[in-house]
Amino acid sequence: MTDIAIPQELLPADGRFGCGPSKVRPEAIGALAAAAPGYMGTSHRQATVRFEVGALRNHLSELLSLPDGYEVLLGNGGTTAFWDAATFGLIESRSQHLSFGEFSSKFAKAAAAAPFLGDPEVIASEPGTHPGGAVAAEGIDAYCLTHNETSTGVMMPLVRPEGAADDALVLVDATSGAGGLRFDPSQVDVYYFAPQKCLASDGGLWIAACSPRAIERIERIAGGDRWVPSSLDLGIALENSRKDQTYNTPALATILLANAQLRWMLDNGGLEFAATRSDTSSGRLYEWAEASKLATPFVSDPADRSRVVATIDFDDSVDAAKLAATLRANGILDTEPYRKLGRNQLRIACFPAIDPSDIDALIASIDYVLERL
């Protein structure tokens, strides 16, 4: 740790750049405070909460431009809970997984552990890359992709594999990408995520945009003889979501904060507005790193560099851990790399809620510290 004090005029107006829980806009916190007396502490089966759940489902359908027949489901828990729910309720016999980082590998592990499923096919690549697209294969009924690998800052295009069986599903983990990356929803059957990233909310909820093909699979498995715990039963989640509620009491603040973010996105131009903000922020970081003598983008292929999570490597002469600690001491938070990646780097969120001007200030602050470390 050093005693470097970054001049106030260089500091970001808001120093939150975390890729775990994201920056929540102050306006959303204000909306929660204003709504709290008639909302917080209300039964999730009453109109006040069901209105917010219905609004969340409708706002997401609009933001993601979901095709006719797609439905938005939600349930308690985060993405980890949804991997378990999908293992029970979406994979019929055998799945294929593209694995290229910590989070994209976890769904494959959940499927491999399920005694009622065949061994999954795993197509892996090194951190900092992605394996390409899914590959159609006989016997595969679920192709499992990740839109944005949060641990490494790699994004990938979402394309249904050519030659896949008509009833096969494409399942996409979109936790850090949903609301910040463009995609064609017609290529995807289940686009699932937790709202604490681009939706600038809190945890405790999973959300899934499901195609008619996925709805049919959910209903068929739920109506069969496979044992499924009620808390992970997608048939129950579907039934409750259609009533604008969850099976058990949800995190009410999470729902309202996500709605506040969604309204802000939609009022300003929708997904194109949100994705453009992330493009601008990440683009400035990558441009700075490419021009720097001490920094470089971790992801070598520009097409694979995430627009919402930027990972920047540093020369061995720079102690990135000390750099991050110095930034933290000056109120610039959560720029440390993903703990299991083990690289000399910073990981910086570029979610839509983060103002690109604060990215400019972050870059200026990093330069100031680098000159003095």
Image: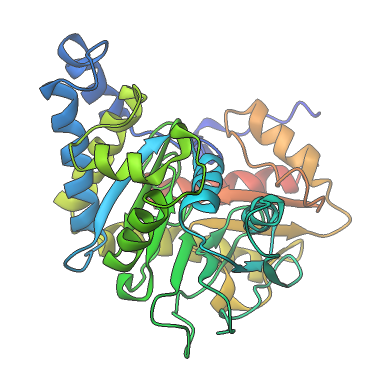
Q: Position of residue 360 (x, y in %)?
A: 48, 52
> Looking at the rendering, which quadrant does residue 27 occupy?
top left
**Quarter of the figure that contains the N terminus:** top right
Identify the image quadrant of residue 315.
Answer: bottom right
- Residue drawn where x is 27% and y is 10% of the image: 41
Task: Say whether residue 85 is left or right of residue 321.
Answer: left
User: Farthest front residue?
Assistant: 225
- What sort of colour scheme is used for the picture? rainbow
Picture layout, residue 357 above or below residue 2: below
Q: Position of residue 366 (x, y in %)?
A: 65, 47
Total numbered labels: 0
Residue appearing at x 70%, y 67% in the figure = 128
Identify the residue at horizontal 68%, vertical 52% (top origin).
115
Q: Position of residue 80 (x, y in %)?
A: 56, 42
- Residue at coordinates 52% horizontally, 31% vertically from top-left? 8
Observer able to see residue 19: no
